[in-house]
Image: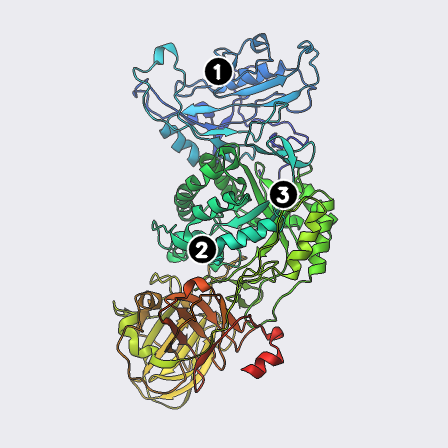
């Protein structure tokens, strides 16, 4: 377990320490043979008793589940220094343990081992026909020595499988001592009926049963690997693909950040850059917006994306989470998990595990047919993500995931973890049975970083799962960039060491709609809509100087694909588009919240009213006259994330998380106070990912709490996707430009639908929709991002393109948008562009 010396015999490159069995004395057993026991608090019971279904009256025609595997005592566990006959004592001890009628044990004996070596083990048949439950012994070539003087040989580590009824399985799960041993894992599922003893042979053998084979890691043998194999080679410190040494050079791309029509273009450019693989996240919340409601259509068609990678000749390193970080909303976890306010995310909390299990049983069966071992192109699968950086350090949770992945994906797929190269993070983020990899950028010492991996994985391939080609942007900070020279130099240094490298990101893309996440580094830091990342392929998918520098480095180590790099996609500056004010937000609540408000004495969070993203309006009335300015204030950290305050429909200012939390107001008793709360993205990294939104505490007037709230969950996207407001009758609203309001406009393309970038001259902050597509948040006052990327696939030819803007603070006197053919950040705004505007 955690804190104990690693003893997993599955890591063939390590020195395997002997295992000690938990046991208690028994007069009936030979000295030195202790039964495996199941501990319940301070007491212990023999395993055969603990696993009993507890009813002797049940039918003797029993079908079983195999659930636990562990190394045998006295088994051969290292280079062939021990006698193969040591296996006999181990089997005898195991047979003592498995004395109950309801438990059944079988043995696999390699043909190289003489059955006479196994005398005294009872009903333990030899030979290939008995390859069901327990494996062990030496494998030797021709001319093997005698049993007393065994030859030099490779080892099949001994493995035992317990088979018992479903009721016993439930008992075992409640007392998971075996699960706590870090060499126990599930490797496969299949139909299975144990060979019955003569007195227990069932009349019929047609029932479907599940076999959970919990085994001790990958077996190290001298046999040739099967076709379609991707394995670890601990002797030569590399991967082996179809038996041959293999090193991948990979790049990250997130299908959720790229419009589906652009998938092929981006993947083809990655292939032509010399990459052999792509690394792909699967955001849980992107596919399960509500519990039990799944969406794998359109831009969310993950299977179509994976099939396209295979078509283009790219291997896949899949990262299905359940947590992914990725600067994605809540790290990919669904916001509806927070409907249970006390849930502990990324832990063994039963409520969390139940949701995870449900999701994995939907997702992983879609993945399994695409594994390399099954003829697909997925060579490895990550379990969780950078768990060492999370405060919980819950090994039970990681073991639960490991079991689930093995049950649903099988024994052959390579599972791995990724963590920062600091030793303290690797300590909590890794687990025997999962190959440990590290991540670091070009500023790190390559030798030291891989040295950290070697502390966990003394043998095996060196892997940097996230080599940072750039960095993300936060609203209000400078645009991040990393020099091409540094990135290329670091890549070359790693490749010279024979390392496997994934470049994060190779193509970043865009946080459309509300999908951008946030960090918390002493304060809340929301991520920009652009996820350009200063990556080799730009946000719009264009090759950059950095890409060609990387391509040159790759060409020194492996041949590049024949042919030219595909060119940048065409861009078009559609020019200036005038907008007009449609309505103040407060005037269209009947459209945006058709079900009406929720009444509550005190404010409720987004999660309490089951609103995941976007906006919620909180409304109450002033309880008294405020002839002198009174302080409207919120408790610290209770405005999540921005609150736009209106009194009698007049905009009074903004309250902000970790920013301004008080305003001075005047008014009369009964005046309407409205606060529009905006969710700017849930925290995606660290201990604060349980990031509740809305008003987390009550507002006060001069320290007197307000009460009697009406709460409006706003379904803005639903209304706009149904054609509103362009299909609605014009509204007569005040001409004031301050405060939340909708603006509309249209434009037509000149017979083309090319990618473009839209700028917001004079605008403050808000959200943009084009033809019902939520393009994302804009915030030019805060920066650095000045333009939003608009993919050509959302535009129309031959009919008007509808623009809808929700401005939250204040529009310019003559509102218009400017469509350009290049992106603008604060640091790249040229005098020529400024003069043109």
State which quadrant residue 737 falls in: bottom left
* Alpha carbon separation for disc pair 2 and 1: 50 Å
Badge 3 crowding class, 10 Å Cα cut-off, few under 14, some 14 to 19, many 20 or more, is some
Q: Which residue in the rendered view is the most extreme toward the bottom?
A: 627
Tell whether 572 sits left or right of 808: right
Label 2 close to label 1 by CB (< 8 Å): no
Point out residue 599 in the picture as x, y percentages from the top left corner. 28, 70
Against 813, is 146 above or below?
above
Check disc 1 and report its element: helix, strand or loop: helix
- Decide which of tag 2 and tag 3 comes sooner along the chain: 3
Point out residue 350 in the picture as x, y percentages from the top left corner. 41, 45
Of labels 2 and 3, the one closer to you: 2
Q: Residue drawn at (37%, 29%), measured in percent from left and top?
A: 166
Against 232, is 47 above or below?
above
Front one among 70 and 316: 316
Residue position for label 2 = 260
Q: Residue drawn at (54%, 17%), measured in percent from left and top?
A: 91
Of labels 1 and 3, the one closer to you: 3
Check disc 3 and report its element: helix, strand or loop: loop
Residue position for label 1 = 130
Point out residue 651 in the picture as x, y percentages from the top left corner. 40, 83
Badge 2 crowding class, 10 Å Cα cut-off, few under 14, some 14 to 19, many 20 or more, is some
- Decide which of tag 2 and tag 1 comes sooner along the chain: 1
Point out residue 801 in the picture as x, y percentages from the top left corner. 38, 70
Q: Is residue 242 visible?
A: yes
Badge 1 crowding class, 10 Å Cα cut-off, few under 14, some 14 to 19, many 20 or more, is some
Q: Which mark is residue 248?
A: 3
Q: Residue drawn at (36%, 66%), measured in percent from left and top?
A: 772
* Alpha carbon separation for disc pair 2 and 3: 26 Å
């Amino acid at each position: 377990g955690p804190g104990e010396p690693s003893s997993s015999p599955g890591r063939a490159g390590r020195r395997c320490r002997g295992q000690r069995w938990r046991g208690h004395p028994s007069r009936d057993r030979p000295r030195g043979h202790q039964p495996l026991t199941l501990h319940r608090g301070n007491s212990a019971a023999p395993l055969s008793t603990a696993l009993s279904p507890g009813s002797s009256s049940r039918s003797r025609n029993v079908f079983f589940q195999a659930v636990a595997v562990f190394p045998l005592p006295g088994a051969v566990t290292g280079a062939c220094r021990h006698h193969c006959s040591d296996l006999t004592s181990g089997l005898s001890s195991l047979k003592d343990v498995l004395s109950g009628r309801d438990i059944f044990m079988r043995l696999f004996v390699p043909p190289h081992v003489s059955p006479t070596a196994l005398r005294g083990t009872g009903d333990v048949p030899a030979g290939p026909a008995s390859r069901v439950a327990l494996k062990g012994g030496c494998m030797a070539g021709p001319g093997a020595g005698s049993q007393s003087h065994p030859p030099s040989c490779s080892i099949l580590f001994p493995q035992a499988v317990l088979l018992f009824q479903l009721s016993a399985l439930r008992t075992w799960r409640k007392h998971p001592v075996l699960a706590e041993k870090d060499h126990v894992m599930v490797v496969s599922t299949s139909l299975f009926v144990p060979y019955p003893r003569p007195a227990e042979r069932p009349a019929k053998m047609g029932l479907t049963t599940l076999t959970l084979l919990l085994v001790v890691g990958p077996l190290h043998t001298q046999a040739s690997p099967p076709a379609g194999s991707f394995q670890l080679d601990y002797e030569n410190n590399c991967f082996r693909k179809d038996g041959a040494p293999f090193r991948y050079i990979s790049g990250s791309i997130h299908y959720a950040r790229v419009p589906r029509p652009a998938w092929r273009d981006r993947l083809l450019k990655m292939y032509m850059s010399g990459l052999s693989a792509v690394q792909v996240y699967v955001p849980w919340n992107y596919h399960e917006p509500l519990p039990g409601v799944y969406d794998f259509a359109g831009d969310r068609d993950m299977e179509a994306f994976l099939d396209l990678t295979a078509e283009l000749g790219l291997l896949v390193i899949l990262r299905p989470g359940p947590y992914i970080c990725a600067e994605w909303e809540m790290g990919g976890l669904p916001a509806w998990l927070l409907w249970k306010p006390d849930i502990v995310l990324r832990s063994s909390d039963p409520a969390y595990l139940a949701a995870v299990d449900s999701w994995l049983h939907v997702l992983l069966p879609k993945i399994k047919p695409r594994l390399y071992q099954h003829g697909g192109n997925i060579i490895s699968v990550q379990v969780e993500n950078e768990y060492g950086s999370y405060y919980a350090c819950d090994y039970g949770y990681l073991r639960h995931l490991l079991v689930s992945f093995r049950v649903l994906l099988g024994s052959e797929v390579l599972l791995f973890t990724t963590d920062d190269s600091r030793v303290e993070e690797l300590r909590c983020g890794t687990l025997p049975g999962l190959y440990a990899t590290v991540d670091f950028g070009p500023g790190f010492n390559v030798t030291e970083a891989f040295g950290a991996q070697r502390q966990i994985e003394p043998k095996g391939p060196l892997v940097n799962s996230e080599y940072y080609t750039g960095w993300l942007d936060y609203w209000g900070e400078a645009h991040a960039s990393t020099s091409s020279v540094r990135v290329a130099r670091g890549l070359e240094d790693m490749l010279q060491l024979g390392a496997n490298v994934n470049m994060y990101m190779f193509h970043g893309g865009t946080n459309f709609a509300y999908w951008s996440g946030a960090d918390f580094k002493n304060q809340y830091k929301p991520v920009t809509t652009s996820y350009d990342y200063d990556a080799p392929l730009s946000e719009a998918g264009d090759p950059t100087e950095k890409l060609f520098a990387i391509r040159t480095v790759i060409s020194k180590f492996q041949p590049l694909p024949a042919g030219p790099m595909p060119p940048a996609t065409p861009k078009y500056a559609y020019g200036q588009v005038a907008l007009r004010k449609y309505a103040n937000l407060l005037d269209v609540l009947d459209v945006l919240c058709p079900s009406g408000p929720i009444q509550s004495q005190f404010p409720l969070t987004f999660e309490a009213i089951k609103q995941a993203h976007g906006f919620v309006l909180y409304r109450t009335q002033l309880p008294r006259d405020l002839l002198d300015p009174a302080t409207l204030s919120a408790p610290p950290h209770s405005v999540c994330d921005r609150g736009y305050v209106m009194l009698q429909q007049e905009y009074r200012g903004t309250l902000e998380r970790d920013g301004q939390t008080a305003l001075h107001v005047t008014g009369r008793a009964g005046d309407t106070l409205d606060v529009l709360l905006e969710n700017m993205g849930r925290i995606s990294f660290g201990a604060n990912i349980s990031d509740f939104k809305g008003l987390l505490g009550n507002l006060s007037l001069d320290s007197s709490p307000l009460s009697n709230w009406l709460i409006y969950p706003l379904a803005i996207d639903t209304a706009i996707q149904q054609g509103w407001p362009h299909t609605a009758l014009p509204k007569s609203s005040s001409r004031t430009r301050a405060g939340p309001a909708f603006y509309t406009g249209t434009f037509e393309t000149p017979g083309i639908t090319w990618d473009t970038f839209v700028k917001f001259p004079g605008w403050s902050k808000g959200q943009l929709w084009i033809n019902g597509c939520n393009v994302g948040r804009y915030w030019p006052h805060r920066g650095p991002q000045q333009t939003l990327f608009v993919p050509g696939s959302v535009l129309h030819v031959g009919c008007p393109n509808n623009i809808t803007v929700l401005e939250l603070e204040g529009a310019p006197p003559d509102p218009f948008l400017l469509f350009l053919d290049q992106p603008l950040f604060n640091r790249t705004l040229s005098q020529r562009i400024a003069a043109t505007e």
